[in-house]
């Protein structure tokens, strides 16, 4: 279970960072993405990244 939480946490953290970057307009990939410069995706990404950090923390504590 510990390894599963760690893997899911790392994936969620990375996805969240990409979503945050796209929402902020820092990551312009792919060029036709509907997420670019959309502020709500910054919040979705930050929430997902935070959830990933929590899972990583839980996996390290168990």
Image (cartoon, grey):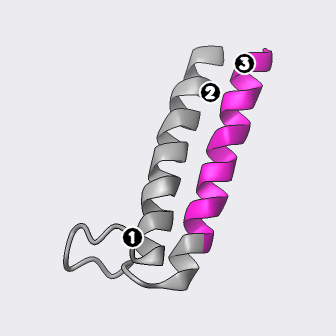
Q: CA distance from mark 3 to mark 1?
A: 31 Å
Q: Quadrant of the N terminus?
A: top right
Q: Residue 11: x and y, percent? A: 47, 39
Left or right: residue 32 versus residue 16 is left
Q: Using the image, tell me which numbered label, if any, was put on residue 5.
A: 2
Helix, strand or loop for disc 1 = loop
Outermost residue toward the left in this view: 31
Horizontal and vertical percent position of residue 28: 28, 72
The residue range painted magenta reads 43-62
Q: Is residue 22 magenta-colored?
A: no
Q: Are marks 2 and 3 in contact (CB under 8 Å)?
A: no
**Residues packed near mark 3 inside 10 Å, few (<14), some (14 to 19) or many (20 plus):** few
The residue tagged 1 is 26
Q: Give above or below for 60 relative to 28.
A: above
Residue visible at 57% across and 16% down in the picture: 3
Task: Tell me if residue 58 can be seen.
Answer: yes
Counting labels gives 3
Cα separation between marks 2 and 3: 9 Å
Q: Nearer the viewer, mark 2 or mark 3?
A: 3
Instruction: From the top left corner, tell me how far across and down residue 35 is, in percent.
Output: 39, 78
């Amino acid at each position: 279970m510990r390894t599963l939480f760690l893997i899911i946490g790392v994936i969620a953290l990375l996805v969240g960072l990409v979503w945050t970057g796209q929402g902020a307009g820092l990551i312009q990939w792919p060029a036709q993405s509907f997420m670019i410069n959309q502020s709500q995706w910054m919040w979705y990404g930050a929430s997902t990244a935070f959830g990933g950090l929590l899972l990583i923390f839980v996996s390290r504590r168990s």
